[in-house]
């Protein structure tokens, strides 16, 4: 965590990042076969392979279990047809881990399997989606008789929902420990510094009372959040990833992220509305686009409404 914090401070890329380390790697360690571990884990650790996630579909977002991408048993492999969407980094990925429907005639949570498949094959087509932020981190992914080998089925046929849920816990647990808990040092311009720069300061404090109150509230909430993340990471000293409680970090962390980017835009006034042009600095343009991009943070990786449902049922034990 100290290493990651220091690398963030100099704006350096953290080693061994991505979905291989944070999502599919831990899942294979816990639920994969010996063969799957031997073939995939060394390449993940060496950084030889990039992974993407095939979960959401055009009609299956928050209700992921309604997915319709079919995988038909064809002997030693599955033949896959369908579509995924919001596939982060698919245009750069070498492999995908995906949830597919292997039995359409049973309850929706039952007939799902978890498979791994190479992206560099004739049956896979990737189309990046240009977002309002100007970037294309998400993609549409189409399968037309794509192939996933039987040896790359993780878990049992029709029992992939359990594997898929466990992977999401690893994802949120990773955000809670390495990414979130190690990011106590703010990277780039601080909210407080920008408030003083654009709104002025008096006796070393932000001059505007209302803005000072907003910044103070944000800083307190963020600090409390980081300390909570660190505590959870330390409590997991046995190496196990926290369970449903990780939804708290996804929910509250994205709201903090959105609040920070909105504050930066608000602080800068009209200079916070820059899209391009010489009248805006590179940092102003970057933060404006980040503000637009962050509006989606409470939707992707499981919407905040879904996280609240998980917290209510699995953490607080409230009735359905």
Image (cartoon, helix red, strand yellow):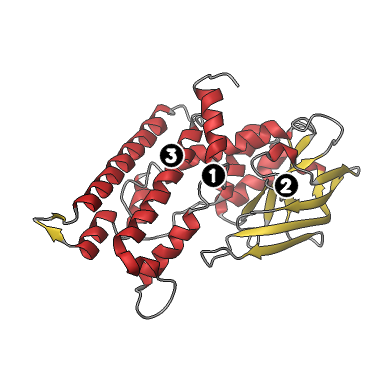
Decide which of 104, 16 is in the foreground and name it: 104
Disc on the earlier residue, 3 or 2: 2
Residue indicated by mark 1: 22
Residue 1 versus residue 317 in the image, above or below: below
> Residue 284, percent across and down?
36, 68
Disc on the earlier residue, 1 or 2: 1
Residue 96 versus residue 234 in the image, above or below: below
Disc 1: CA contacts within 10 A as few (<14), some (14-19) or many (>=20): many
Badge number at residue 252: 3
Residue indicated by mark 2: 59
Q: Is residue 264 left or right of residue 304?
A: left
State the residue at coordinates (68%, 38%).
Answer: 63
> Residue 169, percent across and down?
56, 35
Q: Is residue 158 left or right of residue 189?
A: right
> Residue 167, percent across and down?
61, 38
| Mark closer to the observer (3, 2) | 2
| Mark closer to the observer (1, 2) | 2
State the residue at coordinates (53%, 19%).
Answer: 317
Disc 3: CA contacts within 10 A as few (<14), some (14-19) or many (>=20): some
Mark 1, secondary structure of its residue: helix
C-alpha span from label 3 to label 2: 26 Å
């Amino acid at each position: 965590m100290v290493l990651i914090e220091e690398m963030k401070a100099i704006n350096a890329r953290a080693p061994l990042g991505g979905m291989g380390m944070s999502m599919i790697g831990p899942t294979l360690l816990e639920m994969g076969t010996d063969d799957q571990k031997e073939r995939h884990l060394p390449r993940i650790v060496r950084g030889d392979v990039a992974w993407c996630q095939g979960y959401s579909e055009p009609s299956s977002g928050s209700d992921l279990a309604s997915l319709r991408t079919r995988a038909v048993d064809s002997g030693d492999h599955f033949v896959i047809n369908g579509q995924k969407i919001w596939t982060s980094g698919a245009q750069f990925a070498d492999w995908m881990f995906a949830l597919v429907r292997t039995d359409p005639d049973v309850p929706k949570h039952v007939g799902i399997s978890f498979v791994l498949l190479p992206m560099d094959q004739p049956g896979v087509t990737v189309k990046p989606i240009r977002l309002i932020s100007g970037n294309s981190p998400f993609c549409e992914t189409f399968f037309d008789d794509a192939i996933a080998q039987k040896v790359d089925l993780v878990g049992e046929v029709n029992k992939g929902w359990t594997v898929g849920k466990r992977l999401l816990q690893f994802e949120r647990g990773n955000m809670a420990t390495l990414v979130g808990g190690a990011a106590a040092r703010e990277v780039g311009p601080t909210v407080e510094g920008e408030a003083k720069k654009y709104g002025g300061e008096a006796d070393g404090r932000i001059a505007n009372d209302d803005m000072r109150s907003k910044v103070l509230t944000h800083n307190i909430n963020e600090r409390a959040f980081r300390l909570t993340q660190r505590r959870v990471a330390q409590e997991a000293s046995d190496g196990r990833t926290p369970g449903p409680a990780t939804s708290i970090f996804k929910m509250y962390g994205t709201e903090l992220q959105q609040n920070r980017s909105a504050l930066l835009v608000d602080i800068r006034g009209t200079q916070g509305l820059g899209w391009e042009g010489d009248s805006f600095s590179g940092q102003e343009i970057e933060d404006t686009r980040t503000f637009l991009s962050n509006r989606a943070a409470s939707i992707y990786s499981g919407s905040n409404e879904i996280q609240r449902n998980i917290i209510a049922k699995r953490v607080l034990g409230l009735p359905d």
